[in-house]
Image (cartoon, helix red, strand yellow):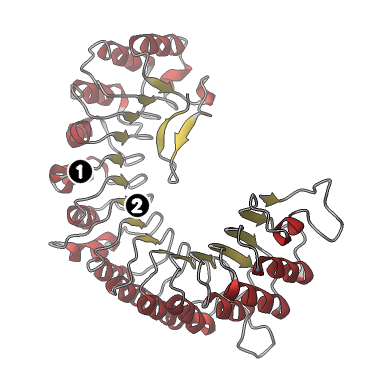
Amino acid sequence: MAWGKPSPDDAADKPAWLPRLEKNDPTLTSLHVLRFRPFDEALQVATAKALEENDSLVEFYASGHRVSEVGAKAWAKMLAINVKLQSLCIGDDEFGSALEEGGETSALDVVLKGLAHSATIGKIDLEYKGVRDASGEAIGRFMSQCGSLKEVRLGRNDKLSETGYRAAFAGASEGGALEALDLSDSKLDDGSARALADVLRSTCPIKTLGLTRCELTGDGLAALGSGLAKCDQLRHLELSGVKLGDGGAQACFSQLAGEKLRVSEANFVQCGISELRDVQGLDAFLCASSELTNVNLRGNKFGNDGLAHLSRGAFAAHAPTCIDFGSCDITSSGTECLKFALTGSKSLSLFDNPKLGDDGVAKLFDAARGSSVTMLDLGAVGLSASGLEAMVKSFGDDQTFPNLRTLVIGGNPGAQEDSWEGLVNNLRAIRPALDVAWRAADGGDDSKLQRDDSGRITGVEK
């Protein structure tokens, strides 16, 4: 339930959901108080009081609301005795600031004392909460004492540095329960990166690590790589937006040669990987991760040479189930390096590689007999109506992409030609089980495209 607009039943000082909490309504399991709704100290205290004996609500989200000392104490008391709540996000960007001028204790510190005694909290969201180094020890104590804790979001807290991170991560290592850590949009200095590496090397069973758009130096990336090398429990790695160009990927991943990781999904969207040395570093990571099923490399301009290196290296031994080469500057002559994906992958995206053109698409289809691919994204690859006509003819051979179920062809110049829609209809007639998607701007409709969290197209709604 999201409390975002007034309900006819709302009293001026009491939202409709509060009596439901107080009565332990079993149908109210999730509650989101939007930031523009009133949620002052009195209402927070009343909410916390209602939750003390509530055993129905599982998730509570009220980000962007100031928490006073009185409110913090009420939340802490509730969290220590509640037996159901599993996911929590409260506070605004002053949550981690000192309650009194010149003081040290914050509302966050007060709440953490209650959280440390929770028997059910599995996820805590502290993103953009003004967390300071002074709260590092309190966060660490919470993570060491709360045995139910599985996920912590700690990104976008610019006041945190090595001191705070090290104290917090030491608690995570001691607790040995944390499985997901998200530090997205954080500035990680070298010391902070070393502290992160230490927790990755510990017995803490981190399976998901989110570092989207984090700022790290070359030394910081090297420290991160040293931690990854010893983190054999990691399954999901998110590095999209992290600057891995100019030797960054080399510094981070070259030390993984000979290591064995168990990562199943890795995202490297727009990481600036273009030079051979960084492609080699990336290949070292991919070689070490033989269990990879999903790899997103969109927006890295390594071109045909980079693709060739990867196809001879890691991808020669193992083809991920889903691979995204969107916006990688791949041209017609690079398609010969995609044979590993055509024979071993289920999903292949070449979106926004406009120099593929008709020739590159034709080469791809020539190599597609018996292909394992079920989803193919050829959006914005420079395909003309003539190229689409050749594609339609290729589909006349039932062994060309025999397993294909979704084909994306939006954003191509040929879509502006009069014959395009008729050719699409011909294609659908030849392959009636094939979903052919093209963008609304091209005259079609992309509203039914199904995408995963990274934006990758996974199918089309029926």
Element assignment for label 2: loop
In primary-sequence order, the first of circles 2 and 1 is 2
* Residue corresponding to mark 1: 305
Image side of residue 303 versus residue 87, left or right? left
Residue 298 position within the rendered picture, expressed as x and y whole percent measured from the top left: 36, 44
Q: Quadrant of residue 195?
A: bottom left
Which label number is shown at residue 397? Answer: none
Against 286, residue 157 (above or below) is below
Against 329, residue 119 (above or below) is below
Image side of residue 135 versus residue 93, left or right? left
Is 390 in front, or is 323? 323
Q: Nearer the viewer, mark 2 or mark 1?
A: 2
Residue 271 position within the rendered picture, expressed as x and y whole percent measured from the top left: 36, 54
Residue positioned 50% across, 22% down in the render: 442
* Residue corresponding to mark 2: 268
Against 189, residue 370 (above or below) is above
Q: Amino acid at mark 2?
A: Phe
